[in-house]
Image (cartoon, grey):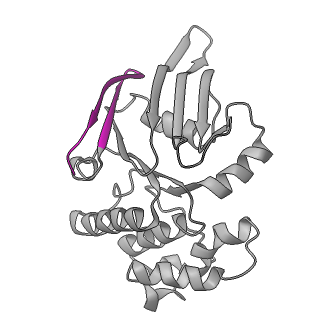
Amino acid sequence: MQGDPIRTPAIQVASLTKSIPTATHTVEILRGLDFTIERGERVAIMGPSGSGKSTLLGLLAGLDTPTSGRIILDGEDITGLDEDHMAVLRGRKVGFVFQSYQLLPTLTAEENVLLPYELTGGNGGGRERARELLESVGLADRRDHYPVQLSGGEQQRVALARAFMVRPPILLADEPTGNLDSQNGQHVLDLLISLNQREGTTLVLVTHDPALSSRANRRIVLQDGRIVSDDALRT
């Protein structure tokens, strides 16, 4: 499905289900979700443990396949894509911020930030962009340091810079402040929102953190695999 890139929503989800068969019964994780996320929105996905939040994020990223339903990402239906085509689409359209940072220990901060650019075959200007992003998160003087030489807050700031490296239209974040103390968590949150606004991305956050969800402009709450509320927030 293609359309005017200005008018096409960032994410469209229709009748989305995910279930896992076991020896005795079928576990229903997601039960018929329907929602649309417009370009530039900041959406927090919340709910108790086991409500399906992380499963939903994995489906939106194309890391897993739904049992039924459709996901349209930046105008492209990803539901039936094979892994090779999905990997190419992820490289162009999706940035990730993980709770556990997911930095490669053998690469410097700058090299970690550069990695998505190199994987998508970038052919010029990448190093300048990486250094600009590291400067924007306050790590210009740490670019030659390895992850083991960085604090948790610094590692997450490198991960933020990496997520924005290829200017993805969609950014997915899974508990991005979950491993940080309150001071570092607030700093990372401020940087995430600032970069999101500067780069014009659509931001989807999975979080338990009320401080994080309060910075979104919309909150989708899951319970037992269903959407129980979907509310616009004042920001």
- Indicate left or right for 107 with 217 as reference: right
Q: Quadrant of residue 120?
A: bottom right
Residue 109 figure quarter: bottom right
Asked if residue 16 is positioned above or below residue 221 in the image, the reply reads above
Using the image as rendered, state which of residue 118 and residue 36 is in the foreground: 36
Residue 18's spot in the image, x, y percent? 56, 23
Note whether 1 is above or below 155 in the view shown: above
Quarter containing the N terminus = top right
Residue at left 59%, top 20%? 20
| Image-based side of 146 in relation to 155, left or right | right
Q: Position of residue 61 (x, y in %)?
A: 58, 44
Q: Residue at x 43, y 79 (%)?
A: 150
Relative depth, front residue between 148 and 62? 62
Question: Closest to the observer: 189 or 167?
Answer: 167
Question: Is residue 234 found inside the magenta-colored segment of the image?
Answer: yes
Report the span colored magenta: 218-235
Give the residue drawn at x 67%, y 57%. 91
Q: Position of residue 41 (x, y in %)?
A: 39, 48
Magenta stretch: residue 70 in it?
no
Q: Is residue 86 above or below residue 188?
A: above
Image location (x, y in percent) of residue 37: 45, 39
| Image quadrant assignment for residue 231 | top left
Q: Residue at x 75, y 36 (%)?
A: 81
